[in-house]
Image: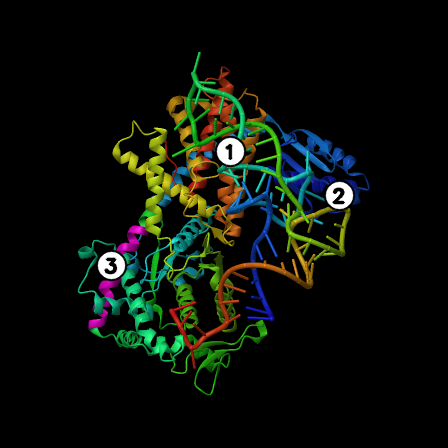
Amino acid sequence: MKTENRIAAAVTDIIREKTGKDVSPNQVVLQKTRREFKGDLTLVVFPFVKMLQQPPEATAEMLGEALMQRLIEVDSFQVVKGFLNLRFSDAFWKSFLFEKIRKEDERIHQHEQETGRQPAVEIHGEGKAKQAGNAESLQGDAERPVVVEYSSPNTNKPLHLGHIRNNLLGYSVASILEASSKKVVKVNLVNDRGIHICKSMLAWIKYGRGETPESAGKKGDKLVGDYYVKFETELRRQMKPLMDAGSGEDEARRKAPLMQEAQELLRRWEARDPEVMQIWQTMNEWVYAGFDETYKRMGVDFDKIYYESDTYLLGRDIVMEGLEKGILHKKEDGSVWANLDEYKLDEKLLLRTDGTSVYMTQDIGTADLRYKDYCPEKMVYVVGNEQNHHFQVLQKVVEKLGKPYAGAIYHLSYGMVELPDGRMKSREGTVVDADDLMDEMVATARSTTEELGKTQDFSDEEKQHLYHIIGMGALKYFILKVDPKKNMLFNPEESIDFNGNTGPFIQYTHARIRSVLRKAGQQRQAMAPGGMKDAPVNDKERQLLNTLYHYPAVVQEAAGEMSPARIANYVYDVAKEFNQFYHDYSILNEEDKAVSDLRLCLAAHTARVIRDAMALLGIEVPEKM
RNA sequence: GGUUCCGUAGCUCAGCUGGAUAGAGCAACAGCCUUCUAAGCUGUGGGUCCCAGGUUCGAAUCCUGGCGGAAUCACCA
């Protein structure tokens, strides 16, 4: 049993013996002792003072004495006001470290096998062909997976900073859930159809003169995005005279010939006109090739790709069924609606007058499909907070329809990435392009590293790899360390820092430790766990051990809250504490062999926790930097 | 106007189910490389935790009401 649980149980027992009363588990508050006090774990005794009818100090004294008697790991205690600070024995910490080193060996081995087995799925090709699971065969399984949807790009524009936050969050949350022993399926729902796609297609047809990514020397997603912009500028040109003639903006937009042509193209697409399909497919392939490159660089992948062109007709049948059952209602004009009065929400349109679907209808359909494919215990949607209302409605409509997965829908809503002068606006050209940003990060990593003269003995290949790791580490950490639900600010003028609370700082700490371990050598490392028995544990070591001790709990909390920020802030603490320890004490030059062994073990385990935690953020750590 | 989220140091952010004197980084200033990587470490200054009530032994945290900001409330996606 975990030590906290044993202490909590002992406290409950002691109070029951003294008073005959039971304390509820949530009254037993145990927390890591604050740095400024002596001790490892603190029990807050205020909840018990009434029961025991003694002042806080006396209560704490009594509990401290009793706990010391009952639990061998409690070595001593100190009372400060109503706080009982328990200190664990050196033996406790050393056995913790010993066990961790041993278990980590196994765990890392297993983890490598698991991740090594998972092939990265490309956005086109295999992903689509991959056979989905069968809900019925999974129904009986105790281990139902969590499906995490993220990325979900449109195929008419390249990825930007907002998508980066989405992708990093999705990938990290999936990793964290996996680490908390969930089965996870990462899915991407690609928005590859609709009027916006037709716009870039139309612009390419009219103005493209057969241009291709090869002929233009551009990534496919960039090329297609340029035509989308081209459409908008040409449209605006057509709107001007209409507006001068007295039309409102919306009306002008509708009336403009270009818009009419785009609508016509959409109709032809829906009729599966071979010529249109041909162009559509070609242009989408260009985009996918571009996205694949960006995803690969970002280090994200998916187990399954859904395409809206396959799923956009889903949901209709479910709505019709709901209509027959009288759950939904039809208006005089033929449109179908869900009444959500009972949830204090407005009524929601599900089928238009002409019988076609809206976005919501599609989402009902894809939720249903996803349930059939995986029978998940939870369906996580990593989508920006601008769609909070949408997901609230989706959840309620599905609930109203009596679907078993209504409770499984979870919108992981994240805040917008803002620039110093507000939101990114594509019209104003203030969008921060994903590829450009990554380029800049890697370039900064290069120049900073070269200035520091750290890579003299690196091969070119090693250098490239290192710069990529550091640049991406800085970017990923910068984004993931902030609470997902909060809006965050990104200032392109001040490039992302490499000092202080940053990815490179943590990567650097890892590299430092690895350097020490390399110096120690394999043999020395293997012998160290057995050699530390007689070593005393000093305060800094104890502090670091205490922090490392909480790692599994932090992972569970991060999984529960789906918050990579928890991991990021934790691993920063680890690195910071290690650096203090490293500064104050020598590991290999320590004269006392047992102490040296202890420190070696401590360093080794710290490196592993850093590597593991950073992996949960999708960040690699280097051996040298 | 309704709903949801946010408001903590000059700036960017932590602060776990309520717990000790509210913490980091950046920026500023002052120190530390003959010793395992100075992308590091140490120190100084910097706070009306938006405001006002309430609950509690105890509130940045929970409740109510304000103020400020963001998002959203389409027969768009």
Callout 3: chain: A
Instruction: Report how far apart the C-alphas of labels 3 and 2 lie in the structure.
Output: 67 Å
Mark 2 = which residue?
A48
Residue A273 lies in magenta, yes or no? no
- x and y percentages locating residue A273 in the rendered image: 22, 75
Q: Secondary structure at mark 1?
A: helix
Q: Main secondary structure of the magenta part?
A: helix
The lab-note entry on whether marks 1 and 3 share a chain reads yes
Confirm whether residue A1 shows in the render.
no
Q: Residue furthest top?
A: A591
**Tag 1 near tag 3, CB within 8 Å:** no
Position of the N terminus of chain A, as image quadrant, is top right
The amino acid type of the residue labelled 2 equals Phe
Q: Which residues are magenta?
A: A275-295
Q: Earlier in the sequence, mark 2 or mark 1?
A: 2
Mark 1 = which residue?
A576
Q: Residue drawn at (65%, 29%), measured in percent from left and top? A: A38
Q: How dense is the environment of label 3, judged by Cα within 10 Å: few (below 14), some, or many (20 and up)?
A: many
Q: Earlier in the sequence, mark 1 or mark 3?
A: 3
Closest to the camera, between mark 3 and mark 2, is: 3
